[in-house]
């Protein structure tokens, strides 16, 4: 199996979960060359998937990338913030804590009678879902059956090892816990007070202005990559493929695992990660988008490899040495030689040819 470039796709970072390919009709103005042979497809990637008929890639027409920030984009940021910090209200008539309840509590942890660092809610009120595993073993379980409006002592022992604070590993402690209410989550209100509590801004207007400026900066920074993506997608839309479903599923699995890793780093399950970090999309929609992205990623890779083969794009020794040095600097390698030893000359060369092919196509593209 031919080695793949370590970055997999130069475009991967700009292929968003919600990205949609242009229709073939939109790319129809581009005249397609002859069918790519099976031999050329195999040479381009030795993959079960292949390009059947390569679309036009010279003078590709693609929509210009705007850096204007819309009201809809600002509102999406607001909606995401509100979803991340929902409000709570007491559940009337519920006084005894059960598994799965969310409780508003204050607590102080003491070791040998003295409060320890990080062991207090500092009278700010803390919403804890019983059974979430957010606290050490015995804390959440110790609140089951307790009543609101009372204060309880929980005699617990920190696990050993305890990476969050090694000094507490295996130590016996006492948590004094005051249970205020059993609560439920409700939609938060978009007010100046909310903005002041959860952001660096002091008013709704200041938040909107600051967010608009931040989004504009991001769009300007991402404009070149987004333009490359649109150009390549125009070629993809004008190309015919024979894609192996197993390869698509394999890429999809990698995408899902990537987001599961992000969720783990955030200390939440994938469902909650989608809710708080991805505008509340459902798992069903997430998996559908992951499948679309996987297919798009495979097609983009195949198209660029097919163009490389059709144009016989290579890199000179001088281009290789310069590219190797840039990659070593970019990824903090000890030296260009060390980077080459780690990934192999063929892999590095494949990546440089990939980049050169993208530049070849994008350099001839036309904004519309």
Image (spheres, rainbow, N blue to C red):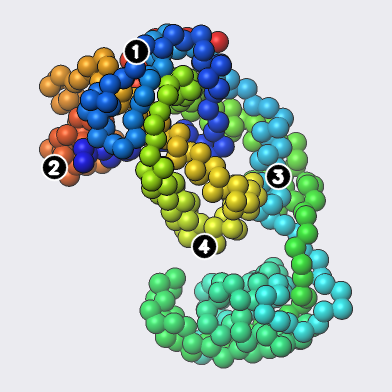
Residue shown at 67% from the left, 75% from the top: 100
Q: Which mark is residue 79?
A: 3
Badge 4 is on which residue? Answer: 267
Badge 1 is on which residue? Answer: 34
Residue shown at 15% from the left, 19% from the top: 316
Q: Which mark is residue 341?
A: 2
Label 2, residues with CA under 10 Å away: few <14, some 14-19, many ≥20: few
Real-space Cα distance between discs 1 and 3?
A: 49 Å
Q: Which mark is residue 57?
A: none
Residue shown at 48% from the left, 60% from the top: 264
Real-space Cα distance between discs 1 and 4?
A: 52 Å
In terms of image quadrants, where is residue 182? bottom right
Mark before the other along the chain sequence, 2 or 3: 3
Verify CB contact (< 8 Å) between mark 1 and mark 3.
no
Real-space Cα distance between discs 4 and 2?
A: 36 Å
What is the number of callouts on the image?
A: 4
Q: Between tags 1 and 4, which lies in front?
A: 1
* 120 sits left or right of 46 in the view: right
Q: Position of residue 166 (x, y in %)?
A: 39, 76
Position of residue 298 relative to residue 105, above or below, is: above
Residue shown at 55% from the left, 45% from the top: 288
Question: The residue tagged with tag 2: helix, strand or loop?
Answer: helix
Real-space Cα distance between discs 1 and 2?
A: 39 Å
* 360 sits left or right of 102 in the view: left
Mark before the other along the chain sequence, 4 or 3: 3
Verify CB contact (< 8 Å) between mark 2 and mark 3.
no
As drawn, the residue found furthest toward the right would be 93
In terms of image quadrants, where is residue 52? top left
Real-space Cα distance between discs 2 and 3?
A: 47 Å
Front residue (pair 219, 307): 307
């Amino acid at each position: 199996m031919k080695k793949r470039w370590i970055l997999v796709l130069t475009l991967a970072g700009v292929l968003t979960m919600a990205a949609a390919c242009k229709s073939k009709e939109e790319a129809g103005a581009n005249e397609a060359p002859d069918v790519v042979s099976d031999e050329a497809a195999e040479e381009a990637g030795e993959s079960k998937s292949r390009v059947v008929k390569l679309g036009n890639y010279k003078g590709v027409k693609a929509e210009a990338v705007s850096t204007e920030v819309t009201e809809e984009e600002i509102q999406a940021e607001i909606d995401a913030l509100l979803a991340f910090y929902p409000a709570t209200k007491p559940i009337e008539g519920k006084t005894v804590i059960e598994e799965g309840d969310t409780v508003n509590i204050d607590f102080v942890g003491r070791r040998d009678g003295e409060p320890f660092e990080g062991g207090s809610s500092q009278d700010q009120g803390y919403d804890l879902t019983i059974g979430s595993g957010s606290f050490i073993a015995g804390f959440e379980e110790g609140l089951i059956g307790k009543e609101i409006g009372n204060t309880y002592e929980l005699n617990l022992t920190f696990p050993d090892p305890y990476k969050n604070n090694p000094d507490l590993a295996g130590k016996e402690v006492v948590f004094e816990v005051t249970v205020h209410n059993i609560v439920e989550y409700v939609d938060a209100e978009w007010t100046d007070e909310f903005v002041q509590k959860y952001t660096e801004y002091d008013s709704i207007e200041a938040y909107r202005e600051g967010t608009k400026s931040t989004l504009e900066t991001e769009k300007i920074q991402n404009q070149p990559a987004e333009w490359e993506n649109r150009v390549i997608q125009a070629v993809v839309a004008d190309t015919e493929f024979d894609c192996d479903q197993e390869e698509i599923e394999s890429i999809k699995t990698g995408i899902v695992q990537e987001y599961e890793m992000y969720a783990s780093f955030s200390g939440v399950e994938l469902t909650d990660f989608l809710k708080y970090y991805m505008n509340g999309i459902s798992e069903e929609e997430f998996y559908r988008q992951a499948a679309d992205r996987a297919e798009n990623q495979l097609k983009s890779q195949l198209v660029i490899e097919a163009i490389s083969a059709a144009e016989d794009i290579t890199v000179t020794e001088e281009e290789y040495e310069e590219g190797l040095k840039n990659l070593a600097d970019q990824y903090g390698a000890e030296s260009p030689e060390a980077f080459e030893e780690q990934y192999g000359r063929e892999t590095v060369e494949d990546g440089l040819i990939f980049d050169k092919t993208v530049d070849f196509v994008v350099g001839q593209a036309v904004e519309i």
